[in-house]
Amino acid sequence: MQLSVIIVSYNVKYYLEQCLHSVITACNNINAEIIVIDNASSDNSINYLKPKFPGVIFIENEINAGFAKANNKVLYQAKGKYILYLNPDTILSENVISNCISFLEEHSE
């Protein structure tokens, strides 16, 4: 696994939907996993998004544990050589991830 993308979500269903579309496109030809951890959203985010993104791993917190705790919880499950923490209101360009990985591979220092 080359990359793990970790996204913490809280009541941002439509932002997260657009984010996931862009992440999936940006991860084309990259061995990546996308993990969304939801902090007990009340907007039905997970039920809305799960069927639309079957390749995404969704984790549901029973309480809003906060941004840092949610990220740390998922970090231990992530399998990627590289970790990308991403806010759910982010839209990625198509080549940004492959360009970043290429740079990291070429500049290991």
Image: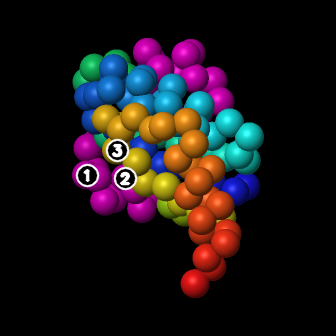
Q: Quadrant of residue 51?
A: top right
Instruction: Name the mark nearer the viewer: 3 or 1.
Output: 3
Question: Are discs 3 and 2 less than 8 Å apart at CB?
Answer: no
Q: CA distance from mark 3 to mark 2?
A: 12 Å
Q: Amino acid at mark 1?
A: Gly
> Percent x, y for residue 8?
37, 44
Q: Earlier in the sequence, mark 3 or mark 1?
A: 1
State the SS at label 2: helix
Q: Is residue 103 visible?
A: yes
Q: What's the magenta region?
A: 46-73
Position of residue 54 relative to residue 72, above or below, is above
**Quadrant of the frame with the N terminus:** bottom right
Q: Which mark is residue 66?
A: 1
Residue at the spot 61% in from the left edge and 76% down from the top edge: 107
Residue at the spot 26% in from the left edge and 28% down from the top edge: 11
Q: CA distance from mark 3 to mark 1?
A: 13 Å
Residue at the spot 67% in from the left edge and 72% down from the top edge: 106
Q: Residues within 10 Å of mark 1 (few under 14, many from 20)?
A: few
State the SS at label 3: loop
Q: Earlier in the sequence, mark 3 or mark 2?
A: 2
Q: Which residue carries the number 2 mark?
A: 70
Q: Residues within 10 Å of mark 3 (few under 14, many from 20)?
A: some
> Percent x, y for residue 93?
48, 37
Q: Which residue carries the number 3 mark?
A: 87
